[in-house]
Image: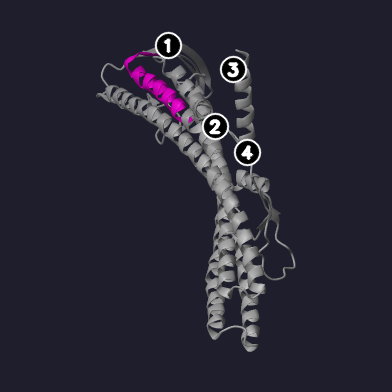
Amino acid sequence: MFILPFADVSRGQQTNPPPVYRLDDCLNIAGKGSPVIQEALQEIEVAEGRKLQAVSDALPHLEAEAGYTYYDNIDYFEGNIPLNQHDNYSLSLRLEQSIYRGGQVFAGIKAAVLYSDYSEVTLEDAQERVKYTVKELFYLLLLAQEVVKVREETVGHMKNYLETTVEKYDQGASSEFEVITARVKLANSYPPLIEAENRVEILKTSLAREMGVQGQEFQIEGYLLYIPFTADLGELQETGREHRALLLQTRINEEMLVENTRVASAGYQPNLSLFASYEGERPQMGFPPEDKFEFEWQAGATLTWSLFDGLLTPGRVKENRGLLEQARIKTKDTERVVQLEIKQSYLNLKSAFRTLQSQEEVVNQAEKAYQIAQIRWENGISTYLELNDAELDLSEARINRLEALAKYRIALAEVERAVGLDLEELKALLEKTDAAESKT
């Protein structure tokens, strides 16, 4: 098992130490504060609004109306009987229920429900993408901090070698060439350290943005652990077909467009609705008008059939059929893309594992070479250059191993994102599938 400890690269004294986040903390914070997830949550609100609008077409509509009219002139019959009044009022209450609209109502409700499902899957897809990005940045930040630690050790060793070489030079045991070379090596060890420190700050800024905590100082802690994982490519691809949120999105979108096409086709059908109203006026029209409210009610049915709407309905039907065909094409293409992503992540994981194995052996060999070079140099049977080369080789081997370990963990995160399940969920599902197959 390979373990990479957290390296603290904070500078200066702080009265209030910044918060320290582990990977789970970063994922939880991003789950609430990530702009990508916040946008997806608002999409759910939009879906709920659409659902209410669609259901409203199936429910009765009740309207109340009140009116007031002022007449400037009052007409009289034979000079003394008024025919109207200055102040005129009206009140009405109307109830209307749609009975048949060519299937538009129920198709609209179903489309709205599907859009609600679509928005929830969109949230899942956003969460998958944010999880992967947070994990990638977290592992890269741990790696960058360890690289800084290795670079600092290299600079420290170069300083020690320079001091030792200068002492030997003063004693006549080393040449001026070796002193100059030691100084050059020390000077050359600073740029990689500065670059590594800058990368730490850049990655920390990127991680903060992904979590939605820009402007807040924080530290991270954790370990890069080697986690064994084996799976068959076919099993991963089959799992991805069922659980990848991106695929579910395209399938639901296709179903929505089927219902939208039915809604558009309803324009060819008649509309039937029932209504009832209760109305009153003051004064009631009469001879002469009486200064009080008179109410009456009425009920009936309305049948309308648009015989020609200027090609509006054919246009809508054609548009939605075209969108439906596009959705079907996109669904098939997305299935191919997902399968390709799963295969790519699977191959990346295998490659990262092989690289990690090889780099572990390289580090072991480099450590042995450095120990031999140090003994030879201390006994005066080798030059400083030989020891320095062994030191640099060991530093680079350690950094390469750290990079291989980080790439392996990132590759695991890629597999999780491509399949649509966390690693523990994926392992449990694969074990369950294997157990079921062994029984048959």
Q: Residues within 10 Å of mark 1 (few under 14, many from 20)?
A: few
Element marked by disc 2: helix
For disc 2, the marked residue is 120
Q: Is residue 235 left or right of residue 167?
A: left
Disc ID at residue 228: 4
> Spatial distance from mark 1 to mark 3, Cα to Cα?
62 Å
379 or 191: nearer the viewer:
379
Q: Nearer the viewer, mark 2 or mark 1?
A: 2
Using the numbered discs, state the Cα–Cα distance from disc 2 to disc 3 in whole angstroms. Answer: 32 Å
- Taking the spot 63% from the left edge, 25% from the top edge, the residue there is 431
Q: Earlier in the sequence, mark 1 or mark 3?
A: 1
Q: Residue lying at the far top in this picture: please name it.
A: 300
CA separation, marks 3 and 4? 23 Å
Q: Which residue is mark 3?
A: 437
Q: Which residue corresponds to mark 1? A: 301
Q: Residues in magenta?
A: 249-272
Q: Earlier in the sequence, mark 2 or mark 3?
A: 2
Q: Is residue 273 magenta?
A: no
For the residue labelled by badge 1, is the local secondary structure a helix, a strand or a loop?
strand
